[in-house]
Image (tube, rainbow, N blue to C red):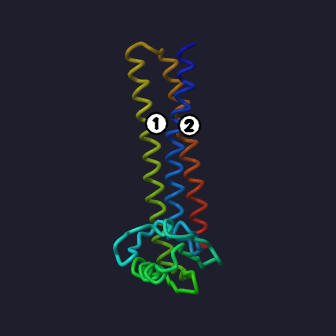
Amino acid sequence: MLFCYNLAMDKNKISAEMDKIIDIFKDELATIRTGRANPALIEDMQVSVYGGEQKMQLKELGTVGVEEARTMIFQPWDKSIIKEVKNEILANSSDLQAVVDGEKIRIKLPTLTMEQRENYLSLLNKKLEAVKVMIRNIRSDHRYEYQDMLQEDEISQDEFHRWEEELQQLTDDYIGELENLASKKQQEIKG
């Protein structure tokens, strides 16, 4: 009975580890351009401000929002840095167009070319494969733990096989969720 309790705890622990991988992948997906404005595309951009004395992320300097499908707005809390921020955005990204409009910066995304879309799809596939490997590594680490328990006669062969099947099912479920997220992003990139 003690083993069953540990098994349930282990499943929760493994799910928590795999949930972290899902969260990492979601954050990575947000940084891939789709042709639609998304604050995640620029909010982590590092810019030098106050005469180059400080390097900060845009989200630390103001708010980033979406105005239209391909237009974002950056509104700094300190209006004195607005021109520095605009120049840094232009310097950090060759494909963004930034224009000061009063107390805010309007940032336009150009339409994606077919080549860019293919590059973003390739990047998406690389990121997907990387997180799948991370999920499989979690599975392997826990499987080795149970193999050790089996060798030490702490669990029976039947318990090991039952746990192995449950571990594989959990892994398949998480990989399926990753593939579903990637599929949605692919559709966004394809436009």
In the image, residue 122 sits, relative to residue 19, either above or below, namely below
**Dot 1 and dot 2 residues touching (CB under 8 Å):** yes
User: Which of disc 2 and disc 1 is earlier in sequence?
Assistant: 1
In this image, 82 relative to 54: left or right? right
Q: Which residue is mark 1?
A: 139
Q: Amino acid at mark 2?
A: Leu
Q: Secondary structure at mark 1?
A: helix
Q: Position of residue 139 (x, y in %)?
A: 46, 36
**Residue sitting farthest toward the left:** 53
Q: Nearer the viewer, residue 51 or 174?
A: 51
Q: Residue at x 48, y 72 (%)?
A: 118
Q: Residue at x 47, y 82 (%)?
A: 86
Q: Position of residue 67 (x, y in %)?
A: 64, 77
Q: Position of residue 161 (x, y in %)?
A: 50, 23
In this image, 133 relative to 70: left or right? left
Q: Amino acid at mark 1?
A: Arg
Q: Which residue is mark 2?
A: 170
Q: Position of residue 149 (x, y in %)?
A: 41, 19
Q: Secondary structure at mark 2?
A: helix
The total of numbered circles placed on residues is: 2
Q: Nearer the viewer, residue 91 or 179?
A: 91
Q: Nearer the viewer, residue 182 or 23?
A: 23
